[in-house]
Amino acid sequence: MKETESHPPDPNPTLLYHYERKQRHTALVLLFNMVVLFAMYGAAHKWIEPGEARDQLFYWINIAVPVVEVCLLLLAIYFWMNNGRFRMSVDTNRFTIDDPISKTYSFSVPVSEIERIRQTYRNHTNYTTTVMYLKSGETIQLTPNYSYSRRALYDALKEANPTIQLPEHPYRFKQV
């Protein structure tokens, strides 16, 4: 986990924002996706007209669907057994993310060191990023993998450090 320090911290920090998600929730989502994939496979068998194109399509689908189903099942089992916790919190001193899947997205920084947050969208790749810029020049990418409330996160960051430059709208990304 990346850590930076600057000013002496508040001895009694107030929690302004907290989001937590266990990996068992992700495991259940993966199992649901398995059911949806199987239903789509059955629907395709029922409604696609017979013919040579259908036979060619199902030659590949009959290979791909079982492979995807096994991969989803193995991931679901891994997440269920591991049951790590994704945590995101902002208090009057620090902004912290602890991601059990990727240590790249785990960090803890003083809110006083955050200069701005920028959200961008690359049209040609259909890819969004949210990057935090620190006064030291360091950049940290915020994880896109969880459904935390950007609005509540940005409100908490603004309350902890009113000088932070935040996007005008938490769910709009500037096209680059």
Image: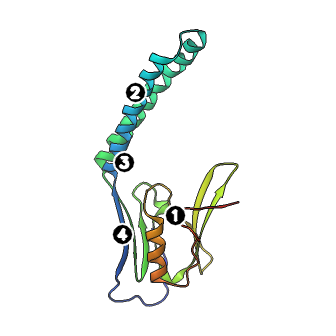
Q: Which residue is mark 2?
A: 39
Choose between 100 and 49: the one closer to the eye. Answer: 49
Image-quadrant location for residue 56? top right
- Quick check: marks 2 and 4 in contact, CB under 8 Å? no
Relative depth, front residue between 160 and 112: 160
- Which residue is label 1 attached to? 142
Q: Position of residue 53 (x, y in %)?
A: 60, 14
Could you say whether the residue bearing mark 3 is in a helix, strand or loop? helix
23 lies above or below 103: above
Image quadrant in which the C terminus is located = bottom right
Residue type (three-letter) at the residue carrying disc 4: His
Q: Residue at x 44, y 76 (%)?
A: 156
**Dot 1: few (<14), some (14–19), or many (≥20) neighbours within 10 Å?**
some
Q: Amino acid at mark 3?
A: Thr
Label 3, label 1: how many angstroms apart (C-alpha)? 19 Å
Judged from the image, the secondary structure of the residue bearing numbered disc 2 is: helix
Residue 83 image position (x, y, % from top left): 30, 52
User: Relative to residue 79, is residue 49 depicted above or below?
Assistant: above
Earlier-in-chain disc, 4 versus 3? 4
Image quarter (top left, top right, bottom left or bottom right) of the N terminus: bottom left
Q: Which residue in the structure is indicated by mark 4?
A: 18
